[in-house]
Image: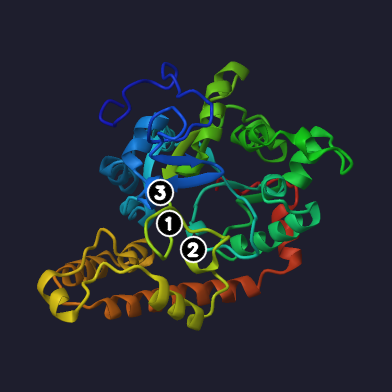
Amino acid sequence: MSRFPSSQSTSAMVEEPTKVVSAGGGDREGEDEQVVNPWEVTAKDGGKIDYDKLIEKFGCQRLDESFVRRVERLTGRPAHVFLRRGVFFAHRDFNEILDVYERGEKFFLYTGRGPSSEALHLGHLDAFKVPLVIQLTDDEKCMWKNLTVEESKRLACENVKDIIACGFDITRTFIFSDFSYVVGIFGFTNEDHIGKISFPPVQAVPSFPSSFPHLFSGKDNLRCLIPCAIDQDPYFRMTRDVAPRIGYQKPALIESSFFPALQGETGKMSASDPNSAIYVTDSSKDIKNKVNRYAFSGGQDSIENHRKYGANLEVDIPVKYLGFFLEDDAELDHIKKEYGAGRMLTGEIKKRLVEVLSELVERHRKARALVTDEVVDAFMAVRPLPLMFS
C-alpha cells in the first residue's frame, strides 16, 4: 500500500514505547508543553493542543485526504462528516482495514465510554455501520473518579440509554460493562479488591475476537478497528506491542482530536464542567444560553471592525461546532466565506449553531425516551448476533 502514508509494514513496525508519556515537549518534568494521556489533557499556559506534535510523539500516522477518498470509493457514499472534516486526524494501520474491506473480508469495531456523568455530551456522539462492541468502563471510573461501585453501574446504565438512542442496530451491537462481563470472565467477585482487575489489560482485551466467544467463535484472526480519541492511544500502543506475541493481529485505530470546550480550544469538553459542553439532556433554552454566553467568538470587538477585518475562523468555536454537526458541506463553506469576510456577524453564526444543536438534541431526546430498561438489557445480553455481518 505504498500510495498511503505508512512507511513500514505492520509486522516490521516498531511501536512507540508503551509507557504513558506527556506528549509534546521534553522528557524532564516541567518541560512538557502539553500533557495528553487517558487521565489528563492539558496544554502549556492554557494554549491549544498541538496535534502535529502528538503524531510525532506517539508515532502514529496522519489520516489524510487520500483515506477519505478511498473510503468514499469503497463504500460508494460520502465519508462520515468526522472523516471529511478532519476530526479523525491520525491512525494506526487504517490502510490495512480498508484492504480487508476491499477484499470482502470481515472486521469489527470496538469503542468505549467511561461513565462519569448521567448524560453524554456532544463530544461523545458518533455513528458506526459495522458489527460493534462497546465497552462501558465503569470499573475505571470507580477507581479514578472516586465513585462507588453502585453509582458507577448506575451511570453506566444511563449512558447505555444515550448510546442506544443514537440509532445502533441491536442485531450488530453488543454493549458490555466491565463490572458485569469482564469481572465475570476473570472470576472476580464483589468482595475482591477492584485493583485486581488491572484496568489497562481490561481495556485491551476487547481488541481480540476471542474475548467474545458468543460473537466470534472460530474467528480468532478477525481484524479490529478502534475509533477513539487520541488520549486513549497509550492503551492501544501497549495492546499492539503485545498482540503478535500472543498470536493475535494488531488492532487498527483511527484517532480523533478533542471537541473543544465552549470557552475555547484549550483542551476538550469535560463532564466535570457543565458550562464547557452541550449535553444531550440540555433544553433548547440551555443550549441557547450556553452558546450565547460561553461560546468563544473569533469576531471583532465592534461591528465596524468586523465588517472591515472579518472573523478569525481559527479560534471561533461556533464555526468549529458547525463543522462537527452541520451535515451540508455547501452551507458550511458559505458560512465560513461570509463570516470570515465580515459579511455575517457573530450573532448570526451563534443563532444557526443553536438551531443545529437544538434539532440534534431534540431528535436524540425523542429516541432516548423509547429506550426502556428492557431494551438496555437486550443490548447487553450475552448472545450470538447471527445477522451482524449481513
Residue 209 sits above or below residue 150 on the image:
above
Secondary element at tag 2: helix
Name the foreground residue: 59 vs 159: 59
* Residue at image location 76% in from the left, 36% down from the top: 195
* Residue matched to label 3: 257
Q: Is residue 235 left or right of residue 217?
A: left
Question: Could you tell me the amino acid type at mark 1?
Answer: Phe
Question: Could you tell me the amino acid type at mark 2?
Answer: Leu
Can residue 277 be seen from the camera position used here? no
* Residue matched to label 1: 259
The answer for how far apart the CA atoms under marks 2 and 3 are is: 14 Å
Question: Could you tell me the amino acid type at mark 3?
Answer: Ser
Of all residues, the one furthest to the bottom in this rendering is 285
Q: Is residue 324 left or right of residue 363?
A: left
Near mark 1 (Cα within 10 A), the count class, few <14, some 14-19 or many ≥20, is: many
Residues at marks 3 and 1 touching, judged by CB atoms closer than 8 Å: yes
Secondary element at tag 3: loop
Quadrant of residue 379 within the rendered picture: bottom right
What is the x, y in percent for residue 38? 55, 42
Give the label on residue 122, or none: 2
